[in-house]
Image: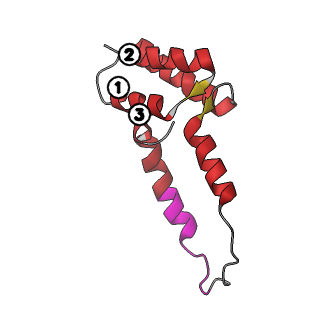
C-alpha cells in the first residue's frame, strides 16, 4: 500500500510535485494515516511554500494566467463595503479543509 511519506519522499527526491502526486496525496489524506505521514505531508507543504520543491499545478496556473489578456474593467459602481467581511468568512473555511485544495 502506498503511503503519504512515499509520495513525499519522491517529491523531495526530484524536487518537483506533479499533479498526479497531488491527487495521490488527496486520496491518501482521506484515509487513516499515522503521525509519520502527517509530518511528511507538513514538511512537503513547507518545502513547496519555501520553493525547495516546485509544484506543477502552480507552474501551470502561472503560465496560463500569463497567457491570458487583461482587459480594462469599468469603474466600480458600488463601494466595496462588506467585501473584506466576506473574504474573512471564506478564508478560514478553506484553511480548515486544506486537504481538499491544492497543496
Residue 13: percent from left, percent from top = 59, 14
Q: Is mark 1 on a helix, strand or loop?
A: helix
Residue 81: percent from left, percent from top = 57, 76
Asked if residue 100 is positioned above or below residue 68 in the image, the reply reads above
Could you tell me if the residues under marks 2 and 3 are in contact, i.e. CB atoms within 8 Å? no
Could you tell me if the residues under marks 2 and 1 are in contact, i.e. CB atoms within 8 Å? yes
* Depth order, front residue of 25/33: 25
For marks 2 and 3, the one nearer the N-term is 2
| Classed neighbour count for the residue bearing mark 3: other residues with Cα under 10 Å, few (<14), some (14–19), many (≥20) | some
> For residue 25, which quarter of the picture?
top left
Image quarter where the N terminus lies is top left
* Depth order, front residue of 4/36: 4
- Which range of residues does the magenta coloring cover? 77-89
Residue 55: percent from left, percent from top = 59, 34
Q: How far apart are marks 2 and 3 (CA)?
A: 13 Å
Q: Distance between the residues labelled 2 and 1?
A: 7 Å
For marks 2 and 1, the one nearer the N-term is 2
Residue marked by disc 2: 3
Q: Residue at image x 55%, y 69%?
A: 83
- Judged left or right of residue 79, residue 29 is left
Residue marked by disc 3: 23
Residue marked by disc 1: 28
Q: Residue at image x 68%, y 25%?
A: 52
Q: How far apart are marks 1 and 3 (CA)?
A: 9 Å
* Depth order, front residue of 33/72: 72
Choose mark 1 or mark 3, whichever is in front: 3
- Judged left or right of residue 68, residue 94 is left
Asked if residue 86 is positioned above or below residue 91 in the image, the reply reads below
Amino acid at each position: 500500500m502506498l503511503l503519504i511519506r512515499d509520495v513525499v519522499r519522491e517529491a523531495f527526491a526530484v524536487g518537483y510535485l506533479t499533479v498526479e502526486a497531488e491527487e495521490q496525496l488527496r486520496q491518501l489524506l482521506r484515509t487513516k494515516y499515522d503521525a509519520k505521514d502527517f509530518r511528511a505531508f507538513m514538511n512537503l507543504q513547507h518545502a513547496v511554500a519555501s520553493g525547495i520543491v516546485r509544484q506543477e499545478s502552480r507552474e501551470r496556473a502561472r503560465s496560463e494566467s500569463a497567457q491570458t489578456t487583461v482587459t480594462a474593467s469599468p469603474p466600480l459602481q458600488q463601494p466595496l463595503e462588506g467585501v473584506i467581511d466576506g473574504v474573512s468568512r471564506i478564508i478560514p473555511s478553506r484553511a480548515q479543509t486544506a486537504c481538499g485544495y491544492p497543496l
